[in-house]
Amino acid sequence: MTDSQQTPSGRIAGADADAEARVRSAVEAGLPSTIAELSRLVRIPSVSWTAYDPANVRASADAVAGLLRETGAFETVEVKQAPIAGETLGQPAVLATRAAKNGRPTVLLYAHHDVQPQGDAANWDTPPFEPTVRGDRLYGRGAADDKAGVMSHVASVRALVEALGPDFDLGLAVFIEGEEEFGSRSFANFLEQNKAALAADVIVVADSDNVDVDTPALTVSLRGNVTFKLTVSTLEHASHSGMYGGAAPDAMLALVALLATLHDENGSVAVDGLRSHDDAAEPPALSDEQFREEAALLPGVTPIGTGPILSRMWSQPTVTITGIDAPSVVDASNTLLPSVAVRLSARVAPGQPASEAYAALERHLRANAPFGAHVEISDIDTGDAFLVDTAGWAATEAKQAMADAWGKDAVETGVGGSIPFIADLVREFPEAQILVTGVEDPDTRAHSPNESLHLGVFKRAILAEALLLARLNRRES
């Protein structure tokens, strides 16, 4: 932005102010159709896990591609796949591009159109793939994570076209991934194959959350992740629990004892070699009462770990068991189990490579297996943590756009979750400025039953992005 385009108070002047007024009007007028289009996307059960029908992911990609074409902003819109390994292809992604003109920057907009499985439908108050508005929230799987991110990009580009006309100077690339919820396994290859089309000065990743429904956030740190299947075995076959129990160690006993070594009496991770991010700035205060409400703790249940609550969630490692393969209660028989498997999910503090964290976990599990139990680790996924550099002009522009759209200054926050592919973006585009934004809030319940999107947050997120794009359209790269 040149000095001539701002008044001394920092307000946009003249024709630029008129353009921004048109952006605001376009976002407001387009919101009903944007919500309707989001609802149509939510109806497509685009679960990217291998056990689910890939035709739904393809249908979702085709629908997103159609929405991007309809904006009239792009020179090319394609549905593409990249290999995971060998001839195995990843899920369909959408890539749309337009070249920058007259020295303007290029912005890459990222989101993902795949979703988590619904889980037990009985835990949903409404059908998971039937979008339902209750009060000021839209409920449904993917309503927030991350089809609302997809639609925030579509709607902001549409508003830009309506306000400025289709012949604006800003370069755009839109990458809507199709397997983020399944580990982004073809992501690195997709970047390599499409590097020229994806190259950008600024990358906006719309897959994070906000402080609350009234306060925008720019995410500046993300934890990494390590996940794998852990199988513990003690017997060659199942044996009668009455005849051999008390002498022969069953796999469940060994597994429970092994898992108990992962945490200390406070619930803090007790794995030698898993590090905290000790250089992190002191996080904002979060009261126990607010945390209890947001985390949905049952009465009498206490938080785990030590240190400030937000530090535990942003700057310390975690280890969680997210699934278990064992006989169900209804099918249980009086036998000693020979093998039991769990899915272990660890979050890695910023500053520690995921490979180092995996090595620490593997050492711990093998060293602490009781009764000589056999330990097998398989199906390993890792992703590195990320720290955002907010010193660049893009972060300054983004925070100002957020403040103008929300009527409240943006807060720089950490997030306990992981977006592992950002490390791939940093590797491929080391000069790009990366902005992590999103449409979620503490009540979103992403990945959980009754996932929802606050429609006020959605509107403000779209407006913030549209204002950012309009301002970057005036900036020389």
Image: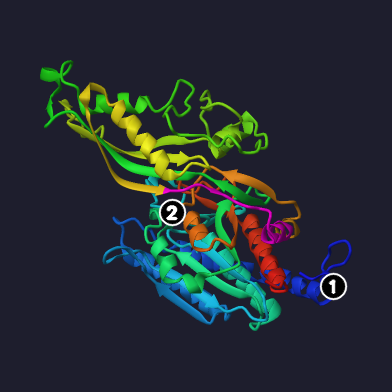
Q: Residue drawn 31% across and 25% down?
A: 368
Q: Residue at x 42, y 35 (%)?
A: 319
Residue 143 coordinates in the image, percent (x, y): 51, 57
Residue 325, image x, y percentages: 26, 38
Whole-number angstrom distance, CA of label 2 to CA of label 1: 51 Å
- The image shows residue 252 at horizontal and vertical percentages of 25, 28
- Asked whether 232 or 444 is in front, the reply is 232
Relative depth, front residue between 125 and 22: 22
Q: Quadrant of residue 307?
A: top right
Residue underneath mark 2: 128
Q: Compared to 355, does 330 lie above or below? A: above
Which stretch is magenta?
383-401
Local packing at callout 2 (Cα closer than 10 Å; few below 14, some 14-19, many 20+) is many
Which residue of the protein is positioned furthest toward the top in this rendering?
246
Look at the numbered disc 1 and give the secondary structure of its residue: helix
Mark 2 secondary-structure assignment:
loop
Q: Which residue is mark 1?
A: 4
Residue ID at (49%, 63%): 428
Q: Amino acid at mark 1?
A: Ser
Image-based side of 136 in relation to 2, left or right: left
Identify which amino acid the numbered label 2 is placed on: Pro
